Structure formats: structure tokens, C-alpha cells
Amino acid sequence: MAFHETGPAAKCYISHGSLPKYIEPKQPPIRKKPFSTISSQPFAHTFDLVLPKELYNLVWDHIKNDIGDVKYSKVIIPLSALLEREFLTQYIKSGNVTSNIVMLSEGRPGVDNIYTLNNGLLRLEMPKEVYERVGLVGTAIRDHGRKHMKTRYGGITAIEINLREPSMVHGKKGFERVVWACKNVLDSAVTWLFQDLDEHIQNSTAGVASPISKHHPKRIICEPKITFLEVLVPPMAIQLPDQANAPKSNDDYLEILEWLGLVVLDSPRIHPNDSIDPHLCQYEIPNPEEVCMTPLVKLTWHALLSAEWITKVLLNCFWAIQKHRQYWFVLSTTVFDMEAVDGLDSYTILTNPSCNSKMALNVSPEEIQENPRPEEPIKPIEYISWEVTRGTGSR
């Protein structure tokens, strides 16, 4: 007898728009797309950047110097370690308002306890029977009760605590309740991924070790894996709905997303010498009569990737193509599974070259290094983004 899950199917949300003519590097518009998509997902594990090889040769050295290497740590500590005075002072309640760490514990959403820390907000997810013992106020969240998967009695409860509030200090009654819960109920040591966005681990002041160092974290430095591709590329200029000859359905957008997925996988189906039997695979590149073989470069990171770092990569790429309007780039991000139901699985952002009626100026690599961030492009840069949620069968 075959069993079929009846949970929600995967969904794809498509959006498009144009960016402002000028974006402040230190204050990007994180409440507007596509930046809101990135900022809403603070924990990602895979990031792919795909761009034409010509653009890569022009701008990658500058982008690499600006974004730096991805550095994070793996450490085993109890939840109560986050509430120690030294840890709070240096990582969370620092006088520098930009001070921030990102932490993610092990666990499966809807099955295990999961703890996260981002922008000073500590989020605890736990079953109802544990919640009734911690003595803190929380809210129920969906677990969907799917078939053939272990669910927790009474549902899941989430507790959110802003550790940057003035009342969150030792000696205050509310804070001591949190400390008691972490030491007496949520007292198990768990494995965390830890990232200091301000590099407190590496740049400790006055030779004093950082608070996390006494727990002997495993330091990891992630460099991108660079892959050079020779693939068939369809026309990347997609007419948006407010333009003439725009597509009447989402098929064109989904075909481009499918092709981008094959690029990320380096699938033989998009290689010029592919000779797969059509009975085994019926995939066809969009607009096959207009495809051309183009050298591409794919850069892949596998690490704990923060929304801040991904935003920095996106901004650098946008600044780069402001003087190279005939080019495009795409970034594809896969996030950690953080929700028991309807959670986001991945998002993809593509710059749309259809808005560039004027071709790029012939700019040398030396000129772009001298002026890598022009204040005003000729026209706003257009983008298309896809957000794909997890379906029942994807777990």
C-alpha cells in the first residue's frame, strides 16, 4: 500500500521592479524588494553567484576585496552561556549599535528544540510540555500535524526575547526568569553555528580573548568554489508586465528559473554537446532558436551566510553593472529549514538587461576600480526575483 502525504505543495512567488538610482552602502532599503527578501532570511547555507566571464574578469577582484571571506565557528555550549555577563556585554549590548552576532542551534523544525539569535533577538522554539515548565510567555506556531512524521504533543510554542532591551540585565526580575529557565529547563548543551559580523573573535582588543573562545570553537573560513562553464544561454532580457510585448503568463519566468537551476547544478542538459535521448529527458532550453554559447563563471559558498553579507554581495554586483549595462548576473540562495510548514527554501534574484536600451560604455578595469560606485546610473536597474517555499515532499 502506498502512502501519500497531503501537506502543502511547494509554491513560487515572482516579483519584479527597479532599484533606486542611488543606494546608500551602509543603509540599504531592507524593507523594499529585493532587499526585504534577503533580510527576512538571516540564516542561509548555500549561495551561488553566476555571471558572464567577461563581467567576472572586470569586477571580481574589486568585489572580492569588499566582501571578504566568510568566517564562522562551530561550538557546543548550553543556552545559558548566551546570558553570561561577558557574552552579553561584548556581543549583544555593545556600545556600537552595529555590533551583531548570528547564532543557530542544531535541530529540526517541528521536531526538536531550536534556538536562534539575530540582531539581539533570542528565539526559542519548544514543545508545549517544555513550554509549560519554562515560565516564560510565548505564542503557538504552526506545525501542520503532517502524516508519517513525528509531531510534538500539543503543538509548538515560540518565545522571543529581545536581549538588547534595557531590562535585560542581571539583577532584573524578568531577566533572572530567563536565566532560571535556561539553567533548569533548557539546560542541555547543543551544537551552534556562530558568526560574529564584527569579527570580535579575530580582532579582540588589548589581547583579551573573546567570550566565545573559552568554549573552544572550531573556526571555519569559507572561500568560494569557482567553476568556469561553457553553456547555452537563452535571451536573458525578459519583458516585464508593464512593458510592451510582456508575457501573459508566468511560464517565461519559470522557464528562466528552471534554466538558472540547471546552471547552478552544472547540468549536462545545457551544454552545447549534450546528446541525451529525448525519451530520457525532454527538457528544452527557452527560445532555442535564439540561444548562444556563452562562457559563464559560477561562484559557490557553503557556510553560515548572514543576510548582511548577501546584501553586500548584491550591492557590489549592482554597482558593477551600472557601467556595464549589457551584462547580467544572478544570485541563488538556499536557506536553512527554519519553519515546520510553508517555510522558504530558496530565493533567486536576476538583473534584467531588457531595460538597457543603451549599451554599456566601454569601461576598462582600471576605470571601474577608480570609480566602482557611480552615484547615478543612466536608467534604474531592473530585477526579477523568485521565492520558492518548501513542499511536503521536500523534507
Image (cartoon, rainbow, N blue to C red):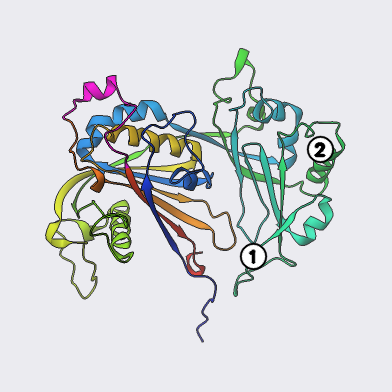
Query: Which sits in the foreground, 334 or 11?
Result: 11
Q: Position of residue 342 (x, y in %)?
A: 54, 62
Tell me the number on the disc at residue 81.
none
Q: Position of residue 32 (x, y in %)?
A: 47, 44
Image: magenta residue range: 362-381
The answer to whether residue 380 is magenta is yes
Tell me which residue sits at (39%, 27%) in the image: 66
| Relative side of 282 to 107, left or right | left
Extreme top residue here? 206
Q: Position of residue 50 (x, y in %)?
A: 30, 44
Tell me which residue sits at (51%, 79%) in the image: 4
Query: Which sits in the foreground, 303 or 198?
Result: 198
Q: Is mark 2 on a helix, strand or loop?
A: helix
Extreme bottom residue here? 1
Residue tagged by mark 1? 143
Residue tagged by mark 2? 175
Number of labels in the image equals: 2
Up the image or down, 129 lies above or below 25; here it is below
Up the image or down, 61 lies above or below 289; here it is above
Q: Earlier in the sequence, mark 2 or mark 1?
A: 1
The answer to whether residue 130 is magenta is no
